[in-house]
Image (spheres, coloured by chain):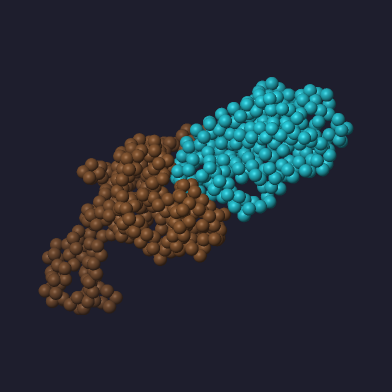
Amino acid sequence: MIVTQELRKTFPGQRKLFRPAGPATDAVDGLSLSIPPGAVTGLLGLNGAGKTTTIKVLATLLRPTSGSVTVDGLDVVTHAREIRRRINLIAGGERMVYARLTGRENLWYFGQLYDVPRAVLNTRIDELLELVGLTDAAGTVVERYSRGMRQRLSIARGLINAPAYLLLDEPTLGLDAPIARDLRAVVANLARDGVGVLLTSHYLAEVEQLCGHVYVVDRGRLVAQGSPTALTAGTRLPHTVELTLAEHAPAVSAAVAALGAEFEVGVDAEERPTFLLRSPEDLAGELATAVVRAGGAIVRLEVNPPTLEDAILAMAGASPAVGAESGRAAVAAR
Amino acid sequence: MATALPTLRRNWLVTMRAYQWTYFVGTLATGILTVGLAYLAFHAIGGGRAGGGFAAAAGTADYLGYVTVGAAASMFSVRMVLWVAKAQITEQREGTLESQVLAPARRLPYLIGVGLQALTTTVVEVVVMLAFAIMIGVRLPAPDPVTLLAAFVAASVAVFGISVPLSAIMISVGEAHITQNTLFVAMGLLCGFTFPPGYLPDPLRWLGEALPITSALRALRAATLEHAPLSAAAPDLLLCLALGLAYLAVGLRLLGPAERIAIQRGGSA
């Protein structure tokens, strides 16, 4: 398991010639989280939240300023080389591979850097090329690859050492939808096979689909954590229910008002009456029952629950004070 | 060697695809120009004779032989520094520094692999340059093979050693040209590639002695121009090796923090 306790990473202020250094920045500020094997854990936040810095510390690329990070009990500072054998990092943006080598040569070279046994390496390279759909382009120099192909090769590179923990920083950035879908399937399979995955992504549907547990950070601090469903429910954001009637029914407005939720009345393009209901709970069932009992004929009923994206935005807006405290409390209770 | 040989192969593949002739011609041209200009100056200005002061300072009256060995050593040094010292900053510029640092492979064998590729290339360049020098009339006596081999190994360690801290400086400041050219100017002035360091004021001469290439050059010239036995060149060889290994140890110590500075500068969010 990867465990961070009160992780802090402070970047010194930038020095400029003949000017005093700027203020230091806490990119990560007392973050405690755990990434178990065999599960996909999400790390979410807005830009500048400290996600990438956190991932770089977990990947041993940066050292923590204070706090501790362990991977299977090994400290990232004192056992960096041993940890590097167990982890890998895939970052979005199609870099991290050699442009003047072919896809196969890249994987061969990284296999050597990870000391993958020769008996295993060639088979693994073939499997990974197949997995990311680059078998036909394996002999092509990477500088001739499209952006998506480079990103797919970068994904294969990240799997070359069969890592026990995989850190994914926006892995589907720039990928076509079918390839991104395939990658999500790969990630889910890896987790099923026992790999611990940490995922950051701007595509929150991806996070909702893959992650059993999500940490939300803002300005380096933990704001909240839980399952995507629990996080969404915890924000108490309103469900919206849109209802359209076949024709005007005088008793319906009173019946809707009796539900006690905030609502708006209007008409649609065909001059049919519409009701827009907002409530912390899903009142679609109660609304439909009330409308029918009041003599209304429903032609359309659409329910929009709050999404994880809505929840993240709400949490980011509500931090730092209350959110950070509740986050710490949640971590402590875990 | 698990990392060195794959890195050697990788660099050969990249070189053959990207810089098939450019580096070769560039390095060779510098050596040929150095020897060619020395030849013209020696005959047009010096009348084909070196002054007594030169023989006293250089330990030989063979000015063209002296410059030819210096030019060969200069080509070798520049090529090695350009490849080994710039290896990490090139990774950074191509976006592969993080994936390289992320792997458990150690830096030393990686840099040895880069150095081996530079070494194999530069041997060919030096041979071509020496052929040119012989063609225009430079006479090189048959060297003492054991001393030459020892001097070659010591010079390789020296140049490799000095390249590693330079690599750390380059990636930590995110700049290569000023750093490398400062070293090249210092080497050209202080190490005695084309004139004896004895002509320099004492402080500069001592500064030159701090660069292992100075003692490497003395050993190379002893092997090639003076046919010196190993025992005669031993003090310079030992000094060169000691300095080269000291620079290497300091460089390896600095490289890890320098890599983290470079990665930190790459993004802080």
- Which one is nearer the viewer's eye here, A167 or B141? B141
**Left or right relative to A277: residue A320:** right
| Chain A display color | brown
- Which one is nearer the viewer's eye here, B121 or A198? B121
Q: Can you give x and y, in whole percent of width and height, for residue B219 in the image?
A: 69, 29
Q: Which quarter of the picture shows residue B155?
A: top right
- Which one is nearer the viewer's eye here, B134 or B169? B134
| Residue furthest right in the image | B47
Q: Relative to B18, is B207 above or below?
A: above
Say which residue appears at 29% left-offset and 75% top-offset: A269
**Left or right relative to A325: residue B161:** right
Q: Which quarter of the picture shows residue B42?
A: top right
Q: Does the rendering let one see residue A95? A: no
Total marks in image: 0
**Left or right relative to A157: residue B218:** right
Say which residue appears at 31% left-offset and 60% top-offset: A209
Say which residue appears at 56% left-offset and 46% top-offset: B5
| Chain B display color | cyan
Q: Can you give x and y, in whole percent of width and height, for residue A248 in the image?
A: 18, 77
Say which residue appears at 53% left-offset and 31% top-offset: B249
Q: Does the rendering let one see residue A12? A: yes
Q: Can you give x and y, in whole percent of width and height, for residue B48 in the image?
A: 87, 33
- Which one is nearer the viewer's eye here, B68 or B255? B68
Q: Can you give x and y, in whole percent of width and height, for residue A195 in the image?
A: 34, 52
